[in-house]
């Protein structure tokens, strides 16, 4: 029996040694794993309620309201300067076709819409003209020099169409009839009578003929 027990005891020792080695090796590893997995990230939730919801960002597209259409007058077969003048007057508030035609008929009679024209028909600069100058042939010293003064204040050329249109509605002579020209529903002859105190020359003749021609060429368009 002793001979039979020796292998068993040896086997027990081997087995015991294996078990002892297992605990010697495995337990520190288990302790390490346990320690590692026990450290969890801290989340600071509100203890009074559920976590705050996730807000999704939505792109907002700005909708530009459609600009209402406007009825305006254009001039068939007119030159660039005539079209610019017509647009300028409408932007300024003169809307009636006959009023617009009357103003343009007077300008055509005075200058043919040539801003650098001097009395007699020569094309020259403002400072070289000795007489009426520009769109409505400003002749008197107060009106002639008033054009130059406004040009200096605005830093513009006195021979430019834009400056002369601004000066035209800046003058006191125009201010006296402005409300009448902005009142719709009058005939060309009536508007022409109003224009006399503005221009200071003529009432009918070629300027009236030009006015009727402009009225016939003006057509309404939606823009």
Image: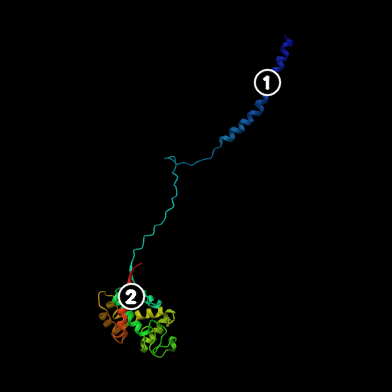
Sequence-wise, the earlier of marks 2 and 1 is 1
Q: Secondary structure at mark 2?
A: helix
Which image quarter: residue 149?
Answer: bottom left
Q: From the viewer's perspective, tell me whether residue 200 is left or right of residue 57.
A: left
Residue drawn at point x = 34 percent, y = 84 percent: 109
Q: Is residue 79 above or below residue 20?
A: below
Residue 178: percent from left, percent from top: 30, 78
Q: What colour scheme does the image use?
A: rainbow
Q: Quadrant of the N terminus?
A: top right
Can residue 100 be seen here? The reply is: no
Q: Quadrant of the C terminus?
A: bottom left
212 or 60: nearer the viewer: 212
Residue drawn at point x = 68 percent, y = 20 percent: 15
Q: Secondary structure at mark 1?
A: helix
Which image quarter: residue 168?
Answer: bottom left
Total marks shown come to: 2
23 or 140: nearer the viewer: 140
Residue 14: percent from left, percent from top: 70, 20
Q: Is residue 7 above or below residue 55?
A: above
Residue 122: percent from left, percent from top: 42, 88
Residue beneath disc 1 = 16
Crowding around mark 2 (Cα neighbors within 10 Å: few <14, some 14 to 19, many 20+) is some
Label 2 vs label 1: CA separation?
A: 120 Å
Residue beneath disc 2 = 217
22 or 149: nearer the viewer: 149
Which image quarter: residue 74?
Answer: bottom left
Q: From the viewer's perspective, tell me whether residue 15 is left or right of residue 62.
A: right
């Amino acid at each position: 029996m002793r001979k039979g027990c020796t292998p068993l005891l040896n086997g027990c020792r081997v087995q015991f040694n294996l078990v002892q080695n297992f605990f010697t090796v495995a337990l520190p590893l288990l302790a390490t794993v346990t320690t590692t997995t026990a450290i969890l990230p801290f989340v600071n939730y509100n203890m009074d309620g559920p976590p705050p919801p996730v807000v999704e960002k939505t792109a907002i597209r700005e909708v530009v309201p459609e600009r209402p259409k406007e009825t305006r007058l254009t001039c068939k077969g007119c030159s660039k300067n005539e079209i610019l003048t017509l647009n300028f007057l409408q932007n300024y508030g003169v809307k009636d076709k006959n009023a617009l035609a009357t103003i343009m008929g007077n300008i055509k009679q005075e200058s043919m819409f040539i801003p650098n024209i001097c009395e007699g028909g020569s094309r020259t600069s403002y400072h070289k003209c000795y007489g009426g100058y520009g769109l409505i042939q400003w002749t008197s010293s107060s009106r002639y020099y008033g054009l130059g003064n406004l040009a200096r204040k605005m830093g513009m050329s006195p021979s430019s169409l834009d400056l002369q249109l601004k000066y035209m509605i800046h003058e006191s002579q125009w201010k006296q009839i402005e409300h009448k020209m902005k009142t719709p529903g009058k005939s060309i002859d009536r508007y022409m009578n109003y224009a006399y105190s503005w221009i200071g020359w003529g009432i009918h003749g070629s300027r009236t003929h030009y006015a009727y021609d402009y009225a016939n060429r003006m057509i309404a368009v939606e823009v």
